[in-house]
Amino acid sequence: MATLKEKLEEILIQLESLGDIKLSAIISRHGLLMVSRATQDSDSEAFAALAATLHMSAESTTKRLSNEAPNSIVVETDENSLITYSAGPNALIVVLASKEGGLGLILTELKKAAKSVEKLV
């Protein structure tokens, strides 16, 4: 039987099959790294902490403005998109994707992945 870590890694592998994903991780809402897959040099633990901080700050802001929590946060640069996606009350999925990838497709697949992660954690 697969471990929790192996099941979470499989979810990230499926996301990466979309292509153009440079980094993916599943983290706790407190910024603790659960699993990550990076195709470039990165400090995964620092990345997890910063991504959780970004998501929680944006969530706090949107709750104050609209009384709703966001499903996802997208930060775009000239070359990449950083996406955090809520995976239930305990986890976030974070991806760094090339602008060449289809953002709509990535968000659709993140929604499916988030449901899987939520069931596991």
Image (cartoon, rainbow, N blue to C red):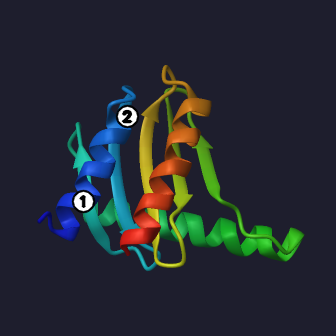
Q: Is residue 33 above or below residue 94?
A: below
Query: Where is residue 22 shown, x and y percent of the image?
Result: 33, 36
Q: Quick one: quadrant of the N terminus? A: bottom left
* Residue type for callout 1: Lys
Q: Is residue 67 visible?
A: yes
Q: Earlier in the sequence, mark 1 or mark 2?
A: 1
Label 1 residue SS:
helix
| Res. 7 mark | 1
Residue at the spot x=42%, y=42% of the render?
A: 96
Label 2 residue SS:
strand
Q: Is residue 34 above or below residue 89?
A: above
* Residue type for callout 2: Ile
Residue at the spot x=43%, y=59% of the render?
A: 116
Q: Is residue 19 above or below residue 29?
A: above
Give the class, few, some or many, for how many residues have Cα within 10 Å of label 2's Cα (few <14, many ≥20).
many
Query: Where is residue 50 shown, x and y percent of the image?
Result: 44, 65
Indicate left or right for 29 with 103 as reference. Answer: left
Q: Is residue 67 above or below residue 82?
A: below
Residue at the spot x=52%, y=36% of the render?
A: 106
Residue at the spot x=71%, y=75% of the render?
A: 60
The residue wearing badge 2 is 21
As measured in the structure, the alpha-carbon distance from the residue carrying label 1 to the one carrying label 2 is 19 Å
